[in-house]
Amino acid sequence: MTDRTANPDHAEPRPDEPPVLALRGVRQVFDTPRGDVPAVAGVDLEVRRGQVLCLVGESGCGKTTTARMAAALAGPTSGSVLFRGRDVAEMDRKERAAFRHSVQYIHQDPYASLNPVRTVLSTVSAGLRRHGAVRGRREARRAVTELLERVDLTPAEDYLDKYPHQMSGGQRQRVAVARALAMNPEVIIADESTSMLDVSIRVSLLNTLGRLRDELGVGFLFITHDLAVAKYFAWRGEIAVMYLGRVVEHGPTPQVVNDPQHPYTRALVSAVCEPDPDLAGTRERVRLRSDDIPDLTALPPGCDFHPRCPSYVQGSCDTERPPLVRSHDRLLACHVLTRG
Ligand code: SF4
């Protein structure tokens, strides 16, 4: 296993450095008995080395579908997923294997993603053995011990021979992170990976992930419905807010969180109930025109958010869908905010 801490390449990425992972106009349309469901309707995102991009939105907004396409667990209906500039769909077997190494996916439920009849040692060393990174049990034990220490499961010896049911949710999720790290990833896609954990355990795991980002230069595509978590983990990164399969606001985290512009982001920020002085209590509650989320099989004309939007303007918001365009320090999809 390569020790990435010693690699000077893991310093801050250069501004001109190309993204490790890029989504270009990706769409995912599901064919259902009720009709076509456009779960993701043209999303462009980039994940860079050592940087965090948080994808935020209500459940069902297309975050997980986007994440699965980014990890090539599902092919897009159209658009491309690029790894170091190369279209994943055009990769040969060898290239795809390298992609699978470099882009690791951590699921929401560690209990479901870990094999219940495998010990921690067996789970974390499986990839190392498969790729010939370790030979023999002693070498595997030593490599897995290092990985467990890296994700703060210490003393590692206490965990090597445990089964998933003998650990807490937070410990299981750390095992899932260690398994991902065993592949020496450039990007980790974390899909609601802390949402099932208690608050203190969640914060501790986020701190561990943040350390991995800084020490190893791992980039994160971090999926969460929780703006407070996004703010905590991606403060030096970016947030992209999704609504009904589209990004409606995307920019540096401090700007998006402290000065949300899009009416949907403002509603999300105002609804945060975490005891966070920046996110809650200091903001006026945004009252939506409707709490009902439109059916994806029968989207309204114009802006998807217009039946709920408090800033709705008749004649433009209900006739034309606003494109995502740059407006000062961020990207926004809103007629009212982006028309001069
Ligand atoms: Fe609201 Fe209109 Fe902007 Fe859509 S385009 S978010 S309906 S103001």
Image (spheres, rainbow, N blue to C red):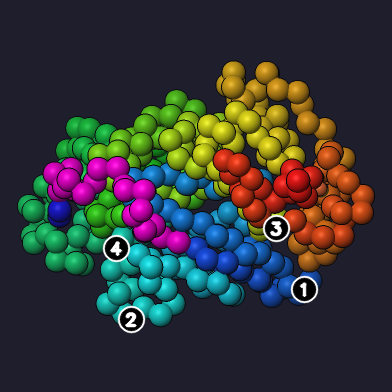
- Residue range highlighted in magenta: 3-22
Q: Which residue is drawn at 36% across and 53% down?
A: 16
Residue 304 sits in quarter: bottom right
Q: Mark 3 points at which residue?
A: 323
Q: Name the residue under label 1.
A: 35
First in sequence: mark 4 vs mark 1: 1
Q: What element carries label 2?
A: loop
Q: Residue at x 8, y 61 (%)?
A: 135
In this rendering, does residue 118 appear at all?
no
Q: How far apart are marks 4 and 1 (CA)?
A: 36 Å
Q: Mark 4 points at which residue?
A: 101
Residue at disc 4, CB closer than 8 Å to ligand 1: no
First in sequence: mark 4 vs mark 2: 2
**Is 214 part of what is drawn in magenta?**
no
First in sequence: mark 1 vs mark 2: 1
Q: Left or right: where does residue 271 sit relative to residue 147?
A: right
Q: Where is residue 167 in the image (x, y as percent from the top left)?
A: 35, 39
Residues at discs 4 and 1 in contact (Cβ within 8 Å): no
In what quadrant of the picture does the N terminus appear? Answer: bottom left
Q: Name the residue under label 2.
A: 92
- In depth, the one of 324 and 107 nearer the eye is 324
Q: Give amino acid for label 2.
A: Asp
Q: Residue at x 24, y 46 (%)?
A: 10
Residues at discs 3 and 2 in contact (Cβ within 8 Å): no
Where 54 sits versus 205, above or below? below
Q: Give amino acid for label 4.
A: His
Q: Where is residue 122 in the image (x, y as percent from the top left)?
A: 23, 55
Q: Residues within 10 Å of mark 2 (few under 14, many from 20)?
A: few
Q: How far apart are marks 1 and 2 (CA)?
A: 34 Å
